Image (tube, rainbow, N blue to C red):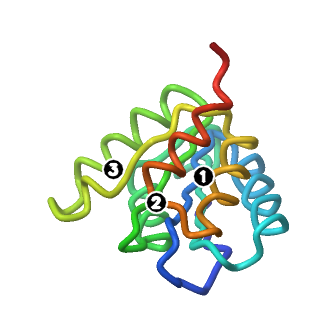
Amino acid sequence: MTKSTSTKHNGNVGIVIVSHSPDVAKGTAQMVQQMVGEEVPLAFCGGDPGGGLGTSVEAILGAIDRAWSEAGVAILVDLGGAETNSEMAIEMQPAERQGKIVVCNAPIVEGAVIAATEASGGASLDVVRRTAEELSPA
């Protein structure tokens, strides 16, 4: 399952949520949208192509495209496989995009909300990432 929840692309950093569970991805995206509205390009994907738990590189590629912003894209993931597939999706991007996409080492729900909040204020990709990662356990 992949979906975009925002239609405005105003130059703010985009947020992509990648979860093994379609419900977690969708619920997290809904929470982000309720917190920041349509100020941030936002997309999510979750589940494997067969409808089970897992992630899909192709779905992540689509989510990156939907949330793409020239300011960059921050990806929030839930488990190791989501991180690995997100890194593969970044490697498959055109060279000019690769340096503008990061995987944040942050809790998926809290990280997505705080990253989107920073992004909605026009923060840079580096600031969005660092702010989300401040939530990581030491």
Q: Secondary structure at mark 1?
A: strand
Residue at x 47% of width, y 79% of height = 11
Which residue is more in the foreground, 90 or 102? Answer: 102
The three-letter amino acid code for the residue at tag 3 is Ala
Q: Residues within 10 Å of mark 1 (few under 14, many from 20)?
A: many
Disc 3 marks which residue? 89
The answer to whether residue 116 is above or below residue 82 is below
The three-letter amino acid code for the residue at tag 1 is Ile
Q: Secondary structure at mark 2?
A: loop
Check the image and report above or below for 83 versus 29.
above
Query: Which label lies toward us, 3 or 2?
Result: 2
Residue tagged 1? 17
Residue 105 at x, y = what percent?
Answer: 53, 32
Near mark 3 (Cα within 10 A), the count class, few <14, some 14-19 or many ≥20, is many
**Residue found 48% across the figure and 73% down from its top:** 66
Q: Earlier in the sequence, mark 2 or mark 1?
A: 1
Whole-number angstrom distance, CA of label 3 to CA of label 1 = 13 Å
Q: State the SS at label 3.
A: helix
- The image quadrant where one finds the N terminus is bottom right
Q: Please, which residue is most extreme toward the left here? A: 95
Q: Residue at x 18, y 64 (%)?
A: 96
Mark 2 and mark 1 in contact? Answer it, CB < 8 Å.
Answer: no
Q: Please name the amino acid that badge 2 sits on.
A: Ser
Dot placed on the residue nearer the N-terminal end, 3 or 2: 3
Q: Which mark is residue 98?
A: none
Q: Identify the disc placed on residue 124.
A: 2
